[in-house]
Amino acid sequence: MGLGVNEIPVAMGPYGQSQPSRFGHRKMGFFMGCAAGMATRALSRTFSCLRFRMRDQELMGGIGKTMMQSGGTFGTFMAIGMGIGC
C-alpha cells in the first residue's frame, strides 16, 4: 500500500520519539556554537589578559565581553550550518 494524499511520513527516532523540527535543529546549532565559542574565547582571552597583568574587574570585564561576542558570532554560523544541513 502506498501513501495517500494526506499521509505524510514522520521520522521516528530509535525509541519512538519524533525528530526535532527545522527550527529545533537551528536552535540546537546556535546553542552548541554559542557554548563552543564562549569556551574557546574564555581560554584564549584569560591567558591574554593575564599576560598583560590585568586584575579583578578589568579581567572579568574583558573576558566576559569577548566571550559573549564570540559565542554569539559562532552560534550564528552554527545555526546557519545546521539550517543548511537539514
Image (spheres, grey):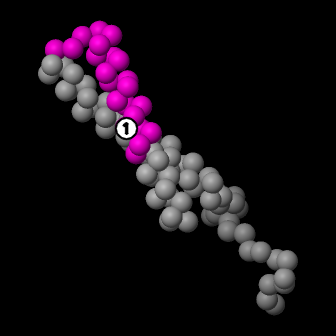
Residue 10 covered by magenta stretch: no
Q: Main secondary structure of the magenta part?
A: helix
- When asked about the image quadrant of residue 61, the answer is top left
Q: Where is residue 17 drawn, in percent x and y?
A: 69, 58
- Classify residue 66 as left or right of residue 81: left
Q: Residue at position x 50%, y 46% from top?
A: 30
Residue 68 vs residue 36, the one in the foreground: 68
Whether residue 32 is visible, yes or no, is: no
31 vs 3: above or below = above
Q: Where is residue 85 drawn, in percent x and y?
A: 50, 65
Residue 64 covered by magenta stretch: yes
Q: Residue at position x 57%, y 55% from top?
A: 25
Q: Where is residue 74 drawn, in percent x and y?
A: 40, 45
Residue interval drawn in magenta: 53-74
State the residue position of label 1. Answer: 70
Residue 17 vs residue 6, the one in the foreground: 6
Identify residue type, mark 1.
Ser
Q: Residue at position x 41%, y 43% from top?
A: 73
Q: Residue at position x 44%, y 39% from top?
A: 72
Whether residue 49 is visible, yes or no, is: yes
67 vs 37: above or below = above
Quadrant in which the N terminus is drawn: bottom right
Q: Where is residue 33 drawn, in percent x and y?
A: 43, 46
